[in-house]
Image (cartoon, coloured by chain):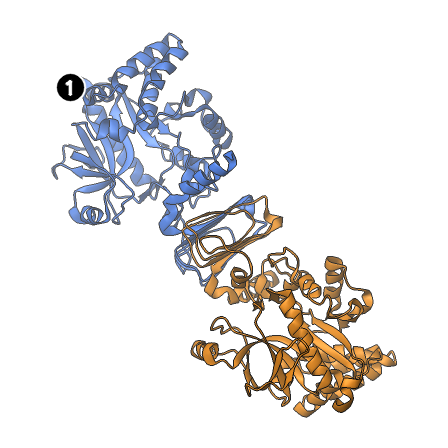
Chain colours: A orange, B blue
Amino acid sequence: MAQNASELEFRTVAVIMAGGIGERFWPLSRENRPKQLLPLSASGKPLLLDTLDRLDGLVDAENRFLVAAAPLCAEISRSTGSLKPENYLVEPARRNTAGCLAWAAACLLARGADPDSTVMVALPADAWVSDQQAYRKVLRAACEAAARHPAIVVVGVTPTRAETGYGYIELADNTPVFQSADGLPVYPVARFREKPNRQTAEEYLTSGKHYWNAGIFVWRLDTFLRELEQAGTPHGAAIPRMADALRRERHAEAECIFLDLPSISIDFALMERARNIWVVPADFHWDDVGEWSALERILPRDSAGNAVSGNPALIDVSDSVIYQDPTASGITVAALGVRDLVLVVTADAVMVLPKSRAQDVRKIVEFLRGRNNE
Amino acid sequence: MAQNASELEFRTVAVIMAGGIGERFWPLSRENRPKQLLPLSASGKPLLLDTLDRLDGLVDAENRFLVAAAPLCAEISRSTGSLKPENYLVEPARRNTAGCLAWAAACLLARGADPDSTVMVALPADAWVSDQQAYRKVLRAACEAAARHPAIVVVGVTPTRAETGYGYIELADNTPVFQSADGLPVYPVARFREKPNRQTAEEYLTSGKHYWNAGIFVWRLDTFLRELEQAGTPHGAAIPRMADALRRERHAEAECIFLDLPSISIDFALMERARNIWVVPADFHWDDVGEWSALERILPRDSAGNAVSGNPALIDVSDSVIYQDPTASGITVAALGVRDLVLVVTADAVMVLPKSRAQDVRKIVEFLRGRNNE
């Protein structure tokens, strides 16, 4: 197949994984308003809209697909209105990113996508990117490489800090295996690395061969299927079976196959096992906006280092994230003498915690869920 | 006069100084809802009502007077409803505690109070006291002493910590000059001490001769007038003139005299200069509830040392003051991983600051006032 690839016409499809519920942005994120729909970036637009906009000139509107559960698809449709109904690939349930991408591949195949000439770009819905032009250039390079070679091509962001919250991609070799039309080099990947501890993250930062895993994966559908099979996960066999059932309009049968899949991430199911992975290094600023403290990286900061949204009264406040939601504009918000704090005020909730504990917002959500169940 | 005092019938009047605006309890305190009207104590009643209740059995209802400016008197009347209109001594303006007490004395004289047989108990409206019985016993002793002797009698609370936020009373001698019918000793005062620094406060705590100035002053009206005159403040001469004008129903004239008075505290105008001051030591717990951090002393605390009002979700929170106003009961309040913090949530405001900066709430009020003026 790969030998003939350069002579084929390729169709590029984007699959946006939008099924996350973003508990870590409570109280702003709720079940029907997950992180990807929050206006967290400086543009004031939902992150998901930014993600779609970044595809302009890269993937045609009809080839942009969004995967999420039904209620979320409905909410996204209401909030964004920029995708046609057929571009929602409604997941029967949440089965993590491996399940999400297997479902998407099955849907595409059922709709007649040719595995040998369809390049699939898998994207998280809710990341933040500083430079749209650089982003498109990198993605275009990844698509070119994945179209012409039977490799999984990923985007690796050059680290700018010793981040312990991200996975890393480790280069096998500093000699490019491919060069894009724009001149971007593509390198072979030695392995995917899980979130490191502080010391290892420091080493990665200066090693020159470690990149942040941006969760962007590009492959031809045939490559994806073959690699899944070689990795030994049940997703490989499930995809053609689900596609076949969907093609025959046996939706319940496809759902049953899907529901039997283990709920595991694509990193665990495939990336940590696959052999043939390439990476396009990216120098744009990127953030997974994983928690409230990320806002200090993606929002403009005041002279005291605060990332501020709304109109709070701040006195002797520094290096803090103060988010006053537009729904809470009638509430006077005041902070004095605090630093490294996260304060979030919405119309019906107030949350305060240290920036260093931002990932523990989940504990609050669990606590409240438990209290409501009582 | 004093020689005959024991043969006279004495009338005891309470003058409650309720003119404070309590900015330090923003956002709960507002101009029309000052601290004394806030339900800050564990009883859930406004501090002012607690103050009035503590006078039961000590001062008859018709002899309880409250001094504040007109709008505040109206608000207090609406909120408490326990005083008759004639028991409000409406101040023409705010002239600090010396002005407040001079005005009250003038009003009492104008209404026919006999200076030689009227014992006036001057009280702040918004203090907290742990033990009502002990409080009454102490106040009764002070009234007895002040009735029978031409002395200013004050209440000195035995310090329980090296508090730098209170003024102190220093004993002249450990030999009582008076003993109450209940057996309480009364001692001569050497001097009033201003708020000390940390080191001095530590010394006071262990000296055995320093007491907190609870701002409770008891005197016969004639004693008050004479001591003011001897202290050389204009209040001494102003009182009979205001009383005379009020008696002749020349209210505007009385107001002019009042408005000419310097705005100074009774401590500065009189206590720091008077010679003849006695003190009744008091062992009840007392707090001036001067700022949000005081709530941890007067509210019950949870096992992590938090003083909590409302129903916030608290995870790994310790030694903090979390106040969710009843008006904000529809707002979910959550805090995680913080300590020594003050968080206040009302229906229309959210405030967060470290406990150690609680006195700086005024800065927030000033900031907001400035912003609103823009």
Instruction: Tell me if B192 is positioned left or right of B31 in this view.
Output: left
| Subunit bearing disc 1 | B
Residue at image location 73% in from the left, 59% down from the top: A80
Vertical relation: B174 (above or below) A109: above
Amino acid at the residue labelled 1: Gln
- Residue extending farthest right: A248
Using the image as rendered, state which of residue B24 and residue B61 is in the foreground: B24
Vertical relation: A247 (above or below) A362: below
Residue at image location 36% in from the left, 35% down from the top: B54
Instruction: Tell me if A303 is positioned left or right of A331 in this view.
Output: left
- Residue identified by numbered label 1: B3
Q: Quadrant of the N terminus of chain A?
A: bottom right
Using the image as rendered, state which of residue B231 and residue A176 is in the foreground: A176
Q: Quadrant of residue A52?
A: bottom right
Using the image as rendered, state which of residue A90 and residue B43 is in the foreground: A90
Q: Quadrant of the C terminus of chain A?
A: bottom right
Instruction: Tell me if B367 is positioned left or right of B171 in this view.
Output: right
Q: Quadrant of residue A282?
A: bottom right
Q: Position of residue A3 (x, y in %)?
A: 75, 91
Residue A369 visible to the viewer? yes
Q: Position of residue B19 (x, y in %)?
A: 40, 29
- Residue extending farthest top: B248
Q: How many marks?
A: 1
